[in-house]
């Protein structure tokens, strides 16, 4: 880090007056009973000096930085300040075709000819480079996506590196993942990822694909292309053969052009169920392999014997982590009737201590919503919740004057028919429902077209396992929530998609199995 | 003509608990190159040195086993990174010890480095390959997980001073055990240099202890030591094999032998299919099965 960067810790990193006003706001966080916490958090901004954001970014095709075929660019915006960060080349269908050709050529000429051992060494290099440049990635990710620096620093970036690390080790051990079979790569993988975990989703997609011997064309989300383009630089530093990884940012229709390209062998998509359906339709009738990781409306079930304080932390983490912009977020709290009141009281107390504001401040718990359109969607659904008769609670807290911010929100008296209990909000909004018996909890938890994740809170181990058997969800967290690890498979039931990412099962999506 | 400068020669020491020591016995023996030229004096470790090494290993075993699998994998990979940096030194020492031409010695050293990488990758995968969830015919969740055995004694291959050693050393380490290694008696110097790499790596002191000395003196003591849980008898001389296994039987040590019919001298350590084996990791693991009821 430069001397300049180390000297400026007391100056707010974002040059946004509104944000710094909030940082200096007088202490008036209320406890539930109205008592004030007698201290305030001093601003603790992470320096942005560590990352150099270029004015212009090109597409990364065949190892080169190239302009879009029609020369068009688009701005990527810092959602915490609404200021543009950079101009990014806007890929076209022609660019996607070029990228697919580059990936095909790299597949034929180099990547599929390398032994698993040598592929592994490239992936280990990438993991190491991500570790070495972790802070740079964390700051860039927070600026481009709005997520708090403590999450990008402690979750997104280390997990992304860990994914490359884990799959590096599989590259030369595929025989042991598929005993008695020969695992062959599929070819060119087309990967379309969302904006909520830009770098982490990139890692979930690229690491297993490369480990299994495929080459990739990846389209990052249009609001968060920067960490993917910095990753292109990591590929160069690792001396990864050109064309093995290609990154082409652009809007949704460019993603559709990518997945419909006839040169593609495999499609992997993470995003909403609505778009996932279109992607499925886009590959229908072809021989392309497909995995989908889509939306969710997870139930977080709290039994009366649960350790309530621990459960409160899990509920808060489950729905307010990453502003609730998480496909597996615990957006429906199912509380056993006998403990609803103390649980809600504790939750409200806890909500009053959540710090909303500058994503680059190390104290911030909830950062900026990723985009104006997402903020509008959250606002609309919250209005629907009120209109349909649910009771809303929001803690008193100042929001910055600029940027896309939304208060942590809690709805009680929610009925299963309410939109806020059925639709994926993808924001910091929790809907509380109640149940009396385990059977009723199962019934309500499964009463959704989604099936990505679920949470269970109880001190009784046998009950956890009983519930686990009945929950239609791909991941069930017991007395914890939102845990992720590269060794642990992740993915959904029903309309939350199919296929698993992570773990040994994550390799399945990227191989063709042949007889020995 | 007088030389410009006199080189500084290295004292080859044993590596116990993260420290480099001469033997408490004050003994050494002459190590010769394959052509008979003396190369250096190596430590002739004593019974006491060996017991100290076992004690260091026992102390280090649990903290090492408690590290996350991913962390252990990174620590092993780091050994490969550091060996790569000392590649030339290893090439020279392996060439001298084993009488290999430079090109062949380079191949051997490169493979030793890559072998660390291969085993490093197993750290967070072996439980997925060897573990299981078992569909018992009753309302129980039943699963089996591998756990490290504890302290492993390794009698290293005699012929392959570096690649053979690494191939036998990495599996118990990635499994989460601590080890006491008796290096090749006739070719111990690459093992000592490896210990110098380990000392500057992230492998905690005591997890790997490397002794040099006479196998006839040391192997029976290692085999009889009741705080050694498992024994790799690969490099045990033929005339000691039965005695050593009888001693191991006393406290029911797990032993790992060479495959039947394989000799130490002829084994091809460059053959990845033969020398990279997950069952070599499994040899140093215990399987633990857990039953838990399912019900409301």
Image (tube, grey):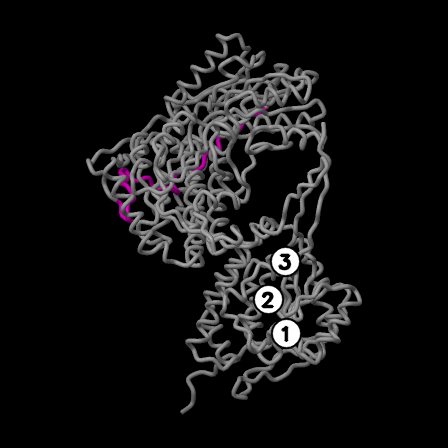
Crowd around label 1: few <14 · some 14–19 · many ≥20 (10 Å): many
**Are the residues tagged 2 and 3 within 8 Å (C-beta)?**
no
Image location (x, y in percent) of residue A17? 39, 25
In the image, which disc is placed on residue B235? 1
The image shows residue A185, relative to residue B272, as above or below, that is: above
Disc 3: host chain? B
Q: Is mark 3 on a helix, strand or loop?
A: helix
Query: Which residue appears farthest toward the bottom when viewing the image?
Result: B1
Locate residue B89 relative to residue A461 in the image: left or right: left
Badge count = 3
Query: Which residue appears farthest toward the right when viewing the image?
Result: B250
Q: Residue at x 34, y 37 (%)?
A: A286
Residue A430 at least partly seen: yes
In the image, which disc is placed on residue B282? 3
Task: Judge if badges 1 and 3 mark residues of a common chain.
Answer: yes
Residue on which disc 2 sits: B168
Image location (x, y in percent) of residue A271? 42, 30
- Closest to the camera, between mark 1 and mark 3, is 3
**Are the residues tagged 1 and 2 within 8 Å (C-beta)?**
yes
């Amino acid at each position: 880090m430069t001397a300049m960067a180390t000297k400026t810790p007391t100056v707010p990193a974002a040059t946004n007056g509104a944000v710094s006003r909030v940082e200096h706001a007088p202490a008036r966080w209320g406890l539930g009973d109205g008592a004030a916490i007698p201290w305030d958090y001093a601003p603790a901004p992470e320096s942005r000096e560590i990352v150099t954001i270029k004015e212009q970014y090109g597409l990364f095709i065949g190892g080169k930085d190239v302009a879009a075929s029609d020369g068009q660019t688009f701005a990527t915006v810092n959602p915490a300040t609404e200021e543009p960060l950079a101009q990014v080349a806007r890929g076209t269908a022609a660019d996607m075709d070029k990228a697919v050709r580059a990936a095909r050529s790299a597949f034929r000429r180099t990547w599929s000819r390398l032994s698993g051992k040598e592929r592994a060494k490239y992936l280990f290099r990438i993991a190491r480079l991500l570790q070495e440049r972790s802070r740079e990635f964390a700051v860039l990710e927070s600026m481009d996506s709005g997520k708090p620096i403590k999450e990008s620093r402690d979750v997104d970036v280390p997990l992304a590196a860990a994914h490359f690390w884990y799959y590096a080790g599989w590259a030369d051990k595929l025989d042991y993942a598929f005993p008695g079979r020969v695992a062959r790569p599929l070819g060119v993988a087309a990967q379309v990822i969302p904006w909520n975990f830009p770098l982490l989703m990139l890692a979930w997609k690229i690491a297993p694909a490369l480990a299994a011997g495929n080459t990739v064309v990846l389209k990052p989300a249009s609001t968060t292309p920067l960490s993917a383009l910095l990753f292109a630089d990591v590929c160069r530093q690792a001396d990864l053969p050109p064309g093995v990884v290609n990154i082409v940012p652009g809007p949704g229709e460019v993603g559709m052009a990518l997945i419909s390209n006839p040169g593609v062998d495999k499609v992997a998509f993470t995003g909403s169920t609505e778009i996932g359906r279109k992607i499925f339709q886009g590959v229908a009738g072809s021989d392309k392999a497909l995995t989908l990781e889509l939306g969710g409306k997870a139930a977080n079930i709290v039994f009366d014997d649960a350790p309530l304080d621990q459960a409160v932390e899990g509920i808060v983490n489950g729905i307010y982590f990453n502003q609730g912009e998480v496909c597996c977020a615990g957006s429906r709290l199912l509380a056993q009737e006998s403990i609803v009141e103390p649980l809600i009281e504790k939750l409200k107390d806890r909500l009053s201590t959540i710090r909303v504001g500058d994503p680059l401040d190390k104290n911030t718990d909830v950062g900026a919503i990723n985009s104006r359109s997402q903020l509008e969607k959250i606002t609309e659904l919250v209005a629907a919740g009120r209109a349909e008769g649910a009771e809303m609670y929001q803690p008193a807290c100042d929001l910055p004057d600029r940027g896309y911010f939304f208060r942590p929100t809690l709805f009680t008296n929610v009925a299963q028919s309410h939109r806020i209990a059925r639709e994926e909000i993808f924001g910091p909004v929790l809907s509380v429902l109640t149940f009396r018996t385990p059977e009723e909890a199962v019934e309500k938890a499964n009463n959704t077209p989604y099936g990505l994740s679920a949470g269970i809170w109880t001190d009784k181990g046998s009950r956890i396992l009983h519930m686990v058997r009945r929950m239609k969800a791909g991941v069930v967290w017991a007395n914890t929530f939102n845990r992720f690890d590269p060794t642990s498979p992740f993915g959904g039931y029903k309309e939350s998609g199919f296929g698993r990412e992570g773990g040994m099962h994550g390799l399945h999506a990227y191989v063709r199995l042949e007889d020995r | 003509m007088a030389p410009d400068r006199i080189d500084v020669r290295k004292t080859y020491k044993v590596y116990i608990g993260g420290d480099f020591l001469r033997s408490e016995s004050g003994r050494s023996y002459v190590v010769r190159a394959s052509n008979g030229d003396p190369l250096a004096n190596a430590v002739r470790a004593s019974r006491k040195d060996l017991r100290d090494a076992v004690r260091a290993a026992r102390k280090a075993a649990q903290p090492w086993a408690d590290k996350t699998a991913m962390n252990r994998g990174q620590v092993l990979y780091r050994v490969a990174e550091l060996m790569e940096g000392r590649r030339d030194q290893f090439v020279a020492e392996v060439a001298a010890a084993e009488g290999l031409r430079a090109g062949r010695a380079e191949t051997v050293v490169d493979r030793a480095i890559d072998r660390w990488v291969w085993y490093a990758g197993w750290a967070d995968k072996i439980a997925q390959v060897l573990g299981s969830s078992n569909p018992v015919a009753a309302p129980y969740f039943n699963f089996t997980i591998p756990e490290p055995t504890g302290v492993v004694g390794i009698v290293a291959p005699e012929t392959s001073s570096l690649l053979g050693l690494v191939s036998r050393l990495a599996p118990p380490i990635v499994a989460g055990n601590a080890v006491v290694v008796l290096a090749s008696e006739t070719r111990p110097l690459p093992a000592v240099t490896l210990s110098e790499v380990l000392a500057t790596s992230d492998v905690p002191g005591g997890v790997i202890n490397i002794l040099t000395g006479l196998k006839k003196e040391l192997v029976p003591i290692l085999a009889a030591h009741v705080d050694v849980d498992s024994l790799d008898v690969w490099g045990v001389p033929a005339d000691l094999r039965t005695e050593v296994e009888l001693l191991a039987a006393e406290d029911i040590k797990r032993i790992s032998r060479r495959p039947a019919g394989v000799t130490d001298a002829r084994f091809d350590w460059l053959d990845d299919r033969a020398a990279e084996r997950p069952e070599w990791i499994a040899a140093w693991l215990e399987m633990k099965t857990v039953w838990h009821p399912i019900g409301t």
